[in-house]
Image: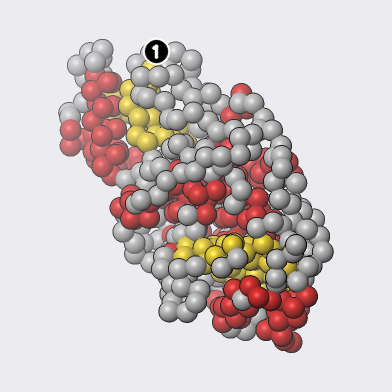
């Protein structure tokens, strides 16, 4: 792999267990409610004694948003437009930058309709889709079921925080449930419902990226997000090894493990034995947006779409975007995380999305999952000690030759929605900082009467 072909990872580093990290991120956060009719969400996660959740296809379609601000099509602040042109100078062709205020005025726009590779700004789309379709009370679930013939089946939804302690509980319960009606010496039969290897990665992910932690395979039963220091090359094999070891430590019964397709329907008479829920929805959003965790973003896309086929999930997400009335010219969805270079977004689209989501009933869950300039996540070391410190909530994106930052800037005149996408620009972080400080000067764009 050549350096030019390899994206710059956010998570290719040792990190604390995800559950501990999420507890730090979500402390003190609350969800907001309002604007009825924007979106439908699924009920809270059912208890282990209840029936399995209804499939997404059975839920009613969300009504279209009514009375919400739409992004204007014409620039209304020529002074800010001129200032941004001066900041960009002779690099203007390498940038797409759009700025809007809370009423939907397009304050400035430089190449705002130019489709560009968004890198991890793609996560802004998949997390918006997820919070709208799934709701703030949703949790991913890993479940142990007992079938009528005594066989056990482990199913999952890609919990990024699933780790050895949870797996050990499943092992203990599988031994107990499998041995209840079996005669001595009869093996405990445990099926692991998983995706086939051809579905572990989006097709557009560079094969060289797949060996790193940020490019780990996307599977339903993923121990530590299928990564240790680097990606686990065969997650089902590792899972079977860990399960056999755990079950051998807890009993002398023979064990038969088998892989089955996760697309195979669970029998209607299956009985739920045990369930391990993930961290909260806000925690999942924060993993995707604050820490730019690719695995979590991919899982959220699939769960929100109700399909683990990435092409179908991307199609469902695009249909959802269309329902929101967003400017979709040039937009292309290829995955949920932004590691696929086939993704295309425009800065004008991203600003419109941010504007719309800031008026969503779950806007606080969404925006509070972003990194914060000078304070948290992938922006913790940027703009510290400047006027932007603690005032810019955003998502970053980095691939070789690509730098993107889009988010909400708090000003004395209310929020400003800013998206900056660059391709081949020099010192992009410095340029974006200069752009943001111009946007922060609200005197350049006086309010309309």
User: Looking at the picture, how far across and down is residue 128, in whole percent?
Assistant: 59, 48
Dot 1: what SS?
A: loop
Seen in the picture, residue 27 relative to 403 is either above or below; the reply is above
Looking at the image, the residue that sits furthest to the right is 74
Q: Nearer the viewer, residue 177 or 248?
A: 177
For this view, does 407 lie left or right of residue 241?
A: right
Residue labelled with disc 1: 148
Rendered location of residue 145, percent (x, y): 38, 23
Label 1 Cα crowd, 10 Å radius (few <14 / some 14-19 / many 20+): few
The quadrant the N terminus occupies is: bottom right
- When asked about the image quadrant of residue 331, the answer is bottom right
Q: Quadrant of residue 79?
A: bottom right
User: How many numbered discs sit on the rendered protein?
Assistant: 1
Query: Residue at the spot x=56%, y=75% of the render?
Result: 2
Q: Residue at x 38, y 30 (%)?
A: 143
Quarter containing the C terminus: bottom right
Q: Is residue 439 visible?
A: no
């Amino acid at each position: 792999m050549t350096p030019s072909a390899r994206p710059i990872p956010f998570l290719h580093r040792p990190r604390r267990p995800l559950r501990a990290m999420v507890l730090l991120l979500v402390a003190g956060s609350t969800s907001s409610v309002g604007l009825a009719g924007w979106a439908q969400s699924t009920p809270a996660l059912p208890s282990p004694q209840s029936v399995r959740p209804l499939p997404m296809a059975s839920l009613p379609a969300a009504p279209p948003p009514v009375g919400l601000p739409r992004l204007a099509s014409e620039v209304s602040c020529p002074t800010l437009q001129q200032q941004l042109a001066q900041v960009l100078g002779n690099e203007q062709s390498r940038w797409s930058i759009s700025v809007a205020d809370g009423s939907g005025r397009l304050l400035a726009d430089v190449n705002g309709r130019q489709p560009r590779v968004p890198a991890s700004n793609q996560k802004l789309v998949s997390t918006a889709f997820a919070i709208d379709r799934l709701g703030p009370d949703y949790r991913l679930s890993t479940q142990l079921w007992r079938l009528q013939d005594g066989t056990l089946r482990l199913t999952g939804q890609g919990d990024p925080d699933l780790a050895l302690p949870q797996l050990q509980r499943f092992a203990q319960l599988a031994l107990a449930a499998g041995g209840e009606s079996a005669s001595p010496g009869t093996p405990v039969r445990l099926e692991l419902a998983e995706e086939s290897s051809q579905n572990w990665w989006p097709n557009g992910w560079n094969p060289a990226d797949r060996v790193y932690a940020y490019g780990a395979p996307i599977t339903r039963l993923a121990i530590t997000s299928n990564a240790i220091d680097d990606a686990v090359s065969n997650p089902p094999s590792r899972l079977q090894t860990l399960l056999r070891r755990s079950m051998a430590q807890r009993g002398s019964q023979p064990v038969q493990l088998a892989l089955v397709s996760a697309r195979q329907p669970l029998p209607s008479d299956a009985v739920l034995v045990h369930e391990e829920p993930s961290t909260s929805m806000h925690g999942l959003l924060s993993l995707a947006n604050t820490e730019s965790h690719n695995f979590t973003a991919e899982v959220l896309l699939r769960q929100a779409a109700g399909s683990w086929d990435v092409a179908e999930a991307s199609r469902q997400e695009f249909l959802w975007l269309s329902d929101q009335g967003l400017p979709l010219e040039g937009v292309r969805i290829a995955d949920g995380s932004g590691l696929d270079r086939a993704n295309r977004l425009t800065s004008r689209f991203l600003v419109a999305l941010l504007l719309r989501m800031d008026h969503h009933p779950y806007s606080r869950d969404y925006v509070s999952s972003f990194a914060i300039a000078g304070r948290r996540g992938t922006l913790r070391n940027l703009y510290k000690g400047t006027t932007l410190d603690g005032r810019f909530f955003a998502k970053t994106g980095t691939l070789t030759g690509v730098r993107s930052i889009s988010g909400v800037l708090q000003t004395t005149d209310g929020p400003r929605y800013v998206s900056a996408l660059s391709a081949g620009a020099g010192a992009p972080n410095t340029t974006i900082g200069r752009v943001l400080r111009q946007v922060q000067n609200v005197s350049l764009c006086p309010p309309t009467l």
